[in-house]
Amino acid sequence: MVKVLHGGKPKTTDEEMLSKIKKGGEIVIAPKVELSEYQEQKASVENMIMTAIKEKVDPATMREFLEMRKELKAEWAKEQFDLAMATAQAKFPEIKKTKKAMDGAKLLYSYAPIDVIVSQVKDILSENGLSYFIKTEVSEKGVKSICVVKHRAGHSESSEMEVPLSTKTAIMSQPQQVAATATFAKRYAFMNAFGIMTGDEDTDAPKEATGTQIEEAMEKLDHCMTMESLKEVWSSLSKEAKANKEIIRHANEIKANIENENV
């Protein structure tokens, strides 16, 4: 028989988080439950709100408490998003380029279609509570795709990619022209949102790029007009530059524009 012992004393306080139970002639002490910093702060704010309701405080003060709770949750959600993204990125495989763009018998470049990219990372995203959706906007200037990444904790961030309409061939209708351009925009919006770079990037963990390295890399990339020149510039960059998200995003944009011109 299990019997809770009070020993003539008050029950264990909430702060101690202990319960003494006599079982089989032994005293078992339940371990203290460790709360995260967010849980402790949330409990404190919730207590203040409950007290405010009981004391019938003025609406302005109540709004301050509710805003405090909202900001606390938002900060926690952002931390969870960043942690999930970092964990997912560490597990992303090298993206395989399965498609080839040809000019007759000449290979122009190889690339990974968005469905191939998604198939290689979707399980990792799911494991880390990440999901996404892509919105596409068509205008006279071209096509803009916005990839919105969401985490189960509630935080979300977006990345957009806008490209001009691809060159229209003799057999291509206007809807096909828009669809081809949208495919490029979606692919790079998705890759930028998750920090994905196709190719044979170095996977070591280098130091962060300096401001000078970033500026020089951006300038070199801006002068790339062909896939060959882009590959040459990329291979010449330092490990620090290749790992920088802004440089990766800019390189992806340059690459998308070059590919788009060759459609």
Image (tube, rainbow, N blue to C red):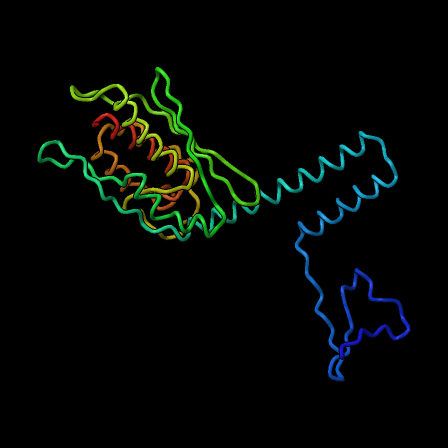
Q: Residue at the location (21% across, 40% down)?
A: 99
Give the x, y percent position of residue 133. 44, 36
Q: Is residue 14 left or right of residue 140?
A: right
| Quadrant in the picture for residue 1 | bottom right
**110 vs 22: above or below:** above
Which residue is at the far top?
A: 140
Residue 10 lies, with reference to residue 194, above or below; the image says below
As drawn, 228 above or below 21: above
Q: Quadrant of residue 118?
A: top left
Q: Which of 17/223 is in front? A: 17
Q: Residue at x 40, y 41 (%)?
A: 195
Q: Viewed as shown, does residue 10 lie left or right of 195?
A: right
With respect to residue 171, does 49 lie above or below?
A: below
**Can you give x and y, in whole percent of width and height, for residue 4 in the image?**
80, 73
- Residue 134 placement, left or right of 48: left
Q: Nearer the viewer, residue 131 or 68?
A: 131
Q: How many marks?
A: 0
Task: Give the percent coordinates (x, y) of residue 249.
Answer: 38, 35
Left/right placement of residue 202 relative to residue 19 reads left
Q: Residue furthest left?
A: 105
- In the picture, the quarter occupied by the C terminus is top left
Q: Which residue, as the protein is rendered here, is positioned at the far bottom?
A: 25
* Residue 105 % position (x, y): 8, 35
Q: Quadrant of residue 215?
A: top left
Q: Residue at left 27%, top 41%?
A: 112
User: What residue is shown at x 34% (from left), y 46% (from top)?
Assistant: 119
Spot the residue most to the right. Answer: 8
